Image (cartoon, rainbow, N blue to C red):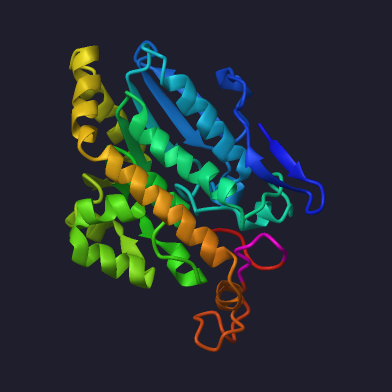
Amino acid sequence: MGGMVDDEKGVIVHPVTMKPLADEEFTTLQITREEKGQVLHCLLNRPERLNAMSHEMIAELHCLLDSLRTDPMVRVLIITGAGKAFCAGADLKAARGDGGGGRWHAKALPNQQHFSGVIWKLREIPQPVICGVHGAASGGGFSLALAGDVRFGGRSLKMNAAFALLGLGGVELGSSFFLPRLVGQNHAAELSMTGRMLGAEEARAWHVVSDVVEDDQVLESCKGLARSMLKLSPQGLVLTKMQLNKSTLLDLRTCIDREDQTQVHMLNTPESMRWASGSDPRSPFHGKKTKFDVTGAGGGKSSL
């Protein structure tokens, strides 16, 4: 993993392609294979950080998804999170180099594209993607879940577009593409323009998740659906995903490109820094101990 390093800032500014990894070589993901290797379970495995996205985790997701493009043995991909959450978004603490991974240049477009590229690849790989989501699915974790073909929710599920509250654009990593298609324009606008939490039952009512089960049954629900998918012929399953995607992938590419440009623009504005830090009296963090640093420059809390 890694990337080019800006000597002045000492941060990663552009990711490079990782070498292929064996299942046991992943450090932020835990990979298991079931059903004679036809179902691959990817466990986001940073439970001490609520599985927040470090640069290393994103690089390993790229590595995994690149390998699945040409792996005819794996027919279904399941993604879940270890511990108390699915994914709490981007790990801003790691971005500062404050533990949990290497620093990255949050204000640079290549970094934004490094993260959003995972969303594109989830839709591009031939395998259907089933996300089992419990606990926090915030910011980038929300977008990661939305990028799945099917989602199951645990009763503890709480989803939101967290970036909307931090002085950034309210859509990111494909959410402007997926949300309106799942919940309609009205609900998509409400969630994206407020950053409010979406609970498990509301997520089911709005068709964000197919079903809500106890947290300890989320993975089994994903596996049950995967087994049902395996009843289709290999080519039939691939072509079904391709056909469902065919009319929308170009729109997804356009949405992601525009989101990337918007977020990088906001990350480079004083307004965003004032909003996230609470120094702007209109910010929801004004006068509170909780502070956020969305730029990776120092200070603040951990995830987006």
Q: List x then y, in percent, for residue 240.
A: 19, 25
Against 230, residue 41 (above or below) is below
Image quadrant containing the N terminus: top right
Horizontal arrangement in the rendering, residue 63 relative to residue 223 (left or right): right
Residue 11 appears in view: yes
Q: Is residue 173 magenta?
A: no
**How far across and down, in percent of the image, does residue 219 sit?**
36, 35
- Which one is in front, 60 or 37? 60
Taking the spot 40% from the left edge, 61% from the top edge, the residue there is 161
x then y, percent, for residue 59 = 58, 35
Most prominent secondary structure in the magenta stretch?
loop
Left or right position of 66 against 211: right
Extreme right residue here? 8
- Residue situated in front as seen by the camera: 235 or 100: 235
Does the rendering let one see residue 136? no
Image point (62%, 73%), residue name: 291
Q: Is residue 294 magenta?
A: yes
Please give the count of numbered marks on the rendered protein. Answer: 0
Q: Quadrant of residue 294?
A: bottom right
The vertical placement of 144 against 293, above or below, is: above
From this view, report whether residue 260 is shown above or below residue 125.
below
Give the vertical position of 37 relative to 298 (above or below). above
Residue at the spot 66% in from the left edge and 68% down from the top edge = 300
The segment highlighted magenta reads: 292-298
Q: Is residue 181 left or right of residue 116?
A: left
Q: Quadrant of residue 18?
A: top right
Relative depth, front residue between 98 and 65: 65
Q: Position of residue 127 (x, y in %)?
A: 32, 24
